[in-house]
């Protein structure tokens, strides 16, 4: 697996405000899609919800907006695993147009029990896969 996962995204009219600029909250949707598709590479059919009774939820977000995206832009939402805890996975993420970084930040997801909403440990096999990806990412640095 490569260190950085990249998902192509086209900006549609529904993503923009009246001026044709992407509405800020839509970047979170783009980043969510990239994280979800990255997690699918670990064999999760439904990357946010498990048949074992747990869900992934966003537990922390820190974003910086650098430049706007506009109607019809071809973007790439990226995700790199930057950390893993007992019940959490941290990502460095960007939205780019060509080589220009439009949005950058860190997002953490937490594994929670679907019934109680309380944190629960990551599945051991999934955690091993994530740790291996994290180690490969650190080797690339």
Image: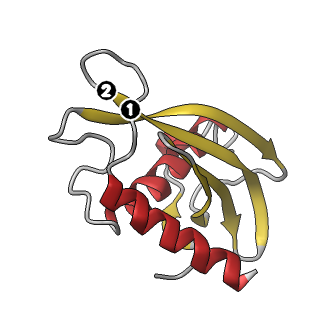
User: Which is nearer the eye, 72 or 66?
Assistant: 66
Q: Position of residue 40 (x, y in %)?
A: 32, 62
Determine whether the residue tagged by mark 2 lies in a helix, strand or loop.
Answer: strand
Determine whether the residue tagged by mark 1 lies in a helix, strand or loop.
Answer: loop
* The image quarter in which residue 54 lies: top left
* The image quarter in which residue 64 lies: top right
Disc with the residue nearer the chain's start (1 vs 2) = 2
Q: Is residue 127 left or right of residue 74?
A: left
Classed neighbour count for the residue bearing mark 2: other residues with Cα under 10 Å, few (<14), some (14–19), many (≥20): some
- Circles 1 and 2, Cβ within 8 Å, touching? The answer is yes
User: Which is nearer the eye, 56 or 96?
Assistant: 56
Distance (Cα) linking label 1 and label 2:
6 Å
Q: Residue at x 31, y 26 (%)?
A: 113
Q: Can residue 7 be spotted in the picture?
A: no
Q: Is residue 46 left or right of residue 141?
A: left
Q: Position of residue 39 (x, y in %)?
A: 39, 59
Please, which colouring scheme is shown? Answer: secondary structure
Q: Position of residue 127 (x, y in %)?
A: 41, 57
Q: Residue at x 75, y 42 (%)?
A: 63
Is 15 situated above or below 5?
above
Classed neighbour count for the residue bearing mark 1: other residues with Cα under 10 Å, few (<14), some (14–19), many (≥20): some
Residue under circle 1? Answer: 120
Q: Can residue 60 be spotted in the picture?
A: yes
Q: Residue furthest right?
A: 66
Residue under circle 2? Answer: 113
* The image quarter in which residue 91 lies: bottom right
Q: Residue at x 49, y 73 (%)?
A: 132
Q: Residue furthest top?
A: 116
């Amino acid at each position: 697996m490569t260190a950085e996962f990249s998902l192509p995204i086209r900006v549609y009219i529904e993503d923009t405000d009246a001026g044709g600029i992407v509405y800020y909250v839509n970047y979170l949707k783009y980043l969510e899609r990239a994280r979800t598709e990255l997690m699918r590479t670990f064999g999760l059919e439904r990357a946010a919800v498990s048949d074992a009774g747990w869900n992934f939820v966003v537990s922390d977000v820190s974003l910086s907006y650098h430049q706007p995206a506009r109607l019809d832009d071809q973007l790439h939402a990226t995700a790199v695993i930057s950390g893993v805890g007992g019940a959490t996975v941290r990502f460095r993420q960007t939205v780019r147009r060509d080589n220009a970084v439009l949005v950058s930040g860190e997002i953490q997801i937490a594994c929670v029990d679907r019934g109680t909403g309380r944190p629960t440990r990551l599945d051991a096999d999934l955690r091993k896969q994530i740790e291996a990806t994290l180690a490969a990412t650190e080797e690339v640095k």
